[in-house]
Image (cartoon, coloured by chain):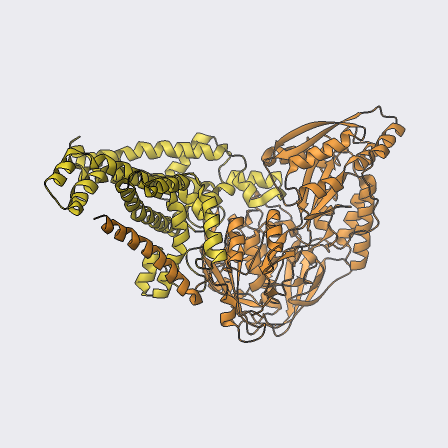
Chain colours: A orange, B yellow
Amino acid sequence: MRTKWHWLLLLVVAGVLALAAGCGGDDEGGDASGTTADETTEGGAEGGTLVFAGASDPVVLDGALVSDGESIRVITQIFETLVALKPGTTEPVPGLAESWEADDAGTTWTFKIREGVTFHDGEPLDAEAVCFNFDRWYNFEGPLQNPGATYYWQVVFGGFKTFNKESGAPEESLYESCEATDETTAVLTLTKPSATFIPALSQQAFSIASPKALEEFNADEGTTDADGIFSPSGTFGTEHPIGTGPFEFVSWTRNDRLVLKRNEDYWGDKAKLDELIIRPIADNAARLQALQSGEIQGYDLVEPQDITTLEGDENLEVIDRPAFNVAYVGFNIAKKPTDDAKVRQAIAYGLDRQAVVDNFYSGRAEVATQFMPPEVVGYADDVTTYEFDPEKAKQILQDAGYELPVPLEFWYPTDVSRPYMPDPKRNFEAFAASLNKSGFKVTAKSAPWNPDYLGRADEGNAGNLRLLGWTGDYGDADNFIGTFFQSPQKAWGTTTTPLTEIEDLLDEAEIETEESKREELYQEANRQIMDQLPGVPYAHSRPALAFTANVNGYVASPTTNESFASVTLEE
Amino acid sequence: MLRFVVRRLLLLVPILLGLSILVFLWIRVLPGSPATTLLGERATQEQVEAINEQYGLNDPLHEQYYAYVKTVGRGDFGDSVTSRRPVTDEFKERFPATIELALAAMLFSVILGIPLGFLAAKRYGTWLDHSSLIASLLGISIPIFFLAIILKYIFAVKLGLLPTVGRISVLIDLEHPTNFYVLDALLAGDVGAFWDVLKHLVLPAVALGSIPLAIIARITRAAVLDVQNEDYVRTARAKGMAPKIVDQRHVLRNALLPIVTIIGLQTGLLLSGAVLTETVFAFPGIGTWLVDAIDARNYPVLQGGILFIALVFVLVNLLVDLSYALLNPRIRLS
């Protein structure tokens, strides 16, 4: 009788094996084989299907309404903006606009719209279509004015046509009007001079969509629930996102895949891939294993600890994305003793930045010399630099008549990890130790990141020194040093102790329409900042992407505006 | 019997109310807020205020709770903060995924666990018994995510036999009328898709089913050992009944009661284990949904999602209790 049970067990084991074998035999159609690319390749490197993993689904494919990276990734493929960025840089180049120029006052900007461009629905792109989009954004009402919905419009243009106090949106707007004077000329009028909005227009929030599709698929319609969250009910952003980009939308199954195909009528260099599939995989380890098993051919947001594994596998490759952030030790220059420029100088010499960057960033960062990354126009090569030198720091303090050690209150955040600051506590500990060696006595203070720490920092209540950082929204100096120092902020103590010269330089740069002059102004501002030292920037960290080795032509960009149009798959 | 069911169903009301209060408070004790998620570190104090005001997050807690219960009472669980879609819609998509996974895991652990346990009991004290003990110890003590990574490494990365993420290959198109992909593939009559969906279920089901498998095997072994020494089994043997019939009619059937109990209990645990398993396999079910929601302080999803889960948990337990009653008439009376 025992044999019967042997049979049963055998049957079960055989069943499991058969299942596995069945799976193995079905490889051609499956995605475990890693041959997905080859099936549709028609000779050479052209064509094929690339599967790429993000961390989650996009929210909605309507540039004006999102600020998350996953939405932006897909929108970049489908839509285009008036101003584009040279791949891999933050340099503005013609996009849907062939050229642009400002009048002398810097308030009227004339855009020459590219001819012969059509949207994916066959509608022509003309100046009227461009103005239709601007008017759409400016006329947003109700919950669409919520900063959670239209964050970037508010950062760049401020308010809307109708002011609604409860929305949280500012009252004033930089935008006045857009007029299509002929088919290819769109004239944008601003309420005050600005030059910074040109690079800002390269953001996906200013994607030009087909006016017909926006209307037909009710892009602005939606419901507001009891919590005040706007949910689009139209299908523009979920089923019919229609732009002019190198890829067209095919389908989107949430939690599973978003499928794009090559736009055969694209005005520029057509995409090399036949199809691009983006799928959401939230777990880091799962993304890595999916790449190793060949289910995907690329993924974003590589964890620093996985780099060695990826680099050790000859079938895989790592692509660096240029740094687009800055980690800094901010000072409160209205508080004693950091109100004294000599003390700030001594602190700069007393911070061992190289050690922090070497030890706590897994080799994925470089020491910062100024408050913006090298990729941004206006970066100055000749700012004053401060090598770690404890003796020099002590000397400066003694020469200035201080009795050592000089006490400093130093704040750091807990419960947080940012790309520019993976482990704030360790950064803090290393800095505190190096300062204590340099004639200071550091008192440690900490608070949970949000809202406590950020609230304190904003209010200027975070002692003399605080750890913070910033990731850029778009590639312009105004988005880095402008946000820190152009207007007085309690955080830096500049409301009571203004840095007038720097503020004036930044004001001037913001409205300077001639690019070379702007660059010089920002460079000068960077030099001044690093002389007056309202803080010490210490790191720019580099994120990474991973691909299988047969993927070529992906150009990583600091602002993550990365097009898959140039990507090819080798057999 | 009917009274029993009605009473148990009525008990649901206080359970869910109590739970909703707990969840409501727990979420609000977590540091951070939806405003942080929506705006990130760039948020100005005014913007955060505006969002808090809009979401009613500045109101006293009891008022917030009352407002919440009122809308939930209307069947409106709100919209997800991150995807801006109704919580109920997302639940409908994700719940079948978790059920499919849990069923597959249960099937795996029952089909393998009961024969293994039975065999270990039959071969009491032999190498087979000992190795099954070691195997179950391993099954219970290896963390799911670790087992998952090892399984994926062997069967996907090294052997290339099975996929590591998702529910279906991205190169296969399949309509999803039920969101149970196995059913959807059958409804569509698509054999290729059916195999593909099964392939995607194998590794997650094995990882998730490892603990119940071990437990079921041990319980079966113990139950069979117990029953084997009962008088009625000896009597049956003594009167010359065929050993196969003795095993089937007397041993297994009587050993089944504790096994069913444990299967019922494991079903609840499967739901919690699904959180880890789904995350590691990027399996779009309730588990990944809730984990993402915690990360994003997605209040509506957390509140709605946990209530749904609790409801399912309570209902599963009720079903288990009812199945006892069917198996053992003595329970029916009490």
Give the tally of numbered discs. 0
Tell me the quarter of the picture where residue B41 sits: top right
Q: Quadrant of the C terminus of chain A?
A: bottom right
Up the image or down, A31 lies above or below B248; here it is below
Query: Residue A228, can we see it?
Result: no
Tell me the residue at 73%/31% (across/down). Answer: A433
Tell me the quarter of the picture where residue A245 sits: bottom right
**Residue A490 placement (x, y as % from top left):** 71, 35
Q: Residue furthest top?
A: A403
Q: Residue furthest front?
A: B126
On screen, residue A102 versus residue B234, left or right, reads right
- Front residue of B259 and A474: B259
**Residue B32 placement (x, y as % from top left):** 54, 37
On screen, residue B163 versus residue A547, left or right, reads left
Up the image or down, A89 lies above or below B94; here it is below
**Residue B325 placement (x, y as % from top left):** 19, 37
On screen, residue B116 versus residue A364, left or right, reads left
- Front residue of B212 and A394: B212
Q: Residue furthest right?
A: A399
On screen, residue B231 versus residue A116, left or right, reads left
Tell me the residue at 29%/35% (across/down). Answer: B12
Query: Residue A447, can we see it?
Result: yes
Up the image or down, B272 lies above or below A570; here it is above
Tell me the quarter of the picture where residue A546 sits: bottom right
Q: Residue furthest left?
A: B239
